[in-house]
Image (cartoon, rainbow, N blue to C red):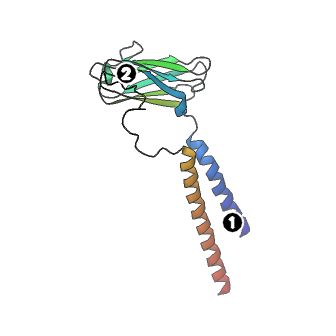
Amino acid sequence: MIKKITAIFALVLAGLFIAPVAANAFYAPDGSVTVSGTVTPGGTSTVAFTGGSFQPGETVSFTLTGENASGATLAAVETKSLEKTASGTGAVNLNVTLPSNASGTYTVAAVGLTSGTPGSATLTVTAAGAGGSGDNDNDLADTGFGAPAFVVWGAAGAVALGAALIAVLVMVRRQRASLAA
């Protein structure tokens, strides 16, 4: 009986530490992506992935999605997709010129073609002359849950650990009841 409890406890404990690592593997961290420039209709912005975001010298594929994205320019290439090579440190920059009729939110998705590492940046178009920086500091309020991933995964692991503990206690109670009968 002790072996079963130990095995269940070891599996749950391993799940607490392995699941968060697996869930966060191969992602460019949010802090490694910056957007600078004017995110307005017809404006040009630079999406920069800092060193370590991708493998050194890796080819990175970029895709722009959003309303009227086919009219946007990615580093002077008239298309919605583009491939660039990361620097020796794994950094890569992309200049995005939005169309003159741009509105809403655009997403720049990047994927390292060797490592499979994804990263993304969101460009929210502000009206021309509105003075917005495009980094969402003074734009609409953030909505949603902004807790770090380890807090969410830790809470999920604690729930799983509690469920395993209840299952073990139920098994022990049943076994004791069958022995007493």
Disc count in the image?
Answer: 2
- Residue farthest to the bottom? 181
For the residue pair 26 and 162, the one nearer the viewer reads as 162
Q: Quadrant of the N terminus?
A: bottom right
Q: Position of residue 82 (x, y in %)?
A: 43, 19
| Residue at position x 66%, y 61% in the image | 8
For the residue pair 131 and 135, the one nearer the viewer reads as 131
The residue under label 2 is which amino acid type? Lys
Q: Left or right? Give the position of 23 relative to 145.
A: right
Which residue is denoted by mark 2 in the rendering? 80
Q: Position of residue 174 (x, y in %)?
A: 61, 78
Classify 10 Å Cα crowding around label 2: few (below 14), some (14-19), many (20 and above).
Answer: some
Q: Are marks 2 and 1 in contact (CB under 8 Å)?
A: no
| Vertical order, 42 against 29 (above or below) | above
| Residue at position x 66%, y 80% in the image | 176
| Residue at position x 38%, y 20% in the image | 38
Classify 10 Å Cα crowding around label 1: few (below 14), some (14-19), many (20 and above).
Answer: some
- Residue farthest to the left? 101
Query: Which dot marks residue 167?
Result: none
Sequence order check, earlier mark of 2 and 1 = 1
For the residue pair 119 and 105, the one nearer the viewer reads as 105
Q: Position of residue 87 (x, y in %)?
A: 58, 17
The residue under label 1 is which amino acid type? Ile
For the residue pair 37 and 90, the one nearer the viewer reads as 37
| Residue at position x 63%, y 47% in the image | 18
Query: Which dot marks residue 5?
Result: 1
Q: Quadrant of the C terminus?
A: bottom right
Q: Secondary structure at mark 1?
A: helix
| Distance from the alpha carbon under mark 2 to that under mark 1 | 55 Å
Q: Left or right? Give the position of 90 relative to 129.
A: right
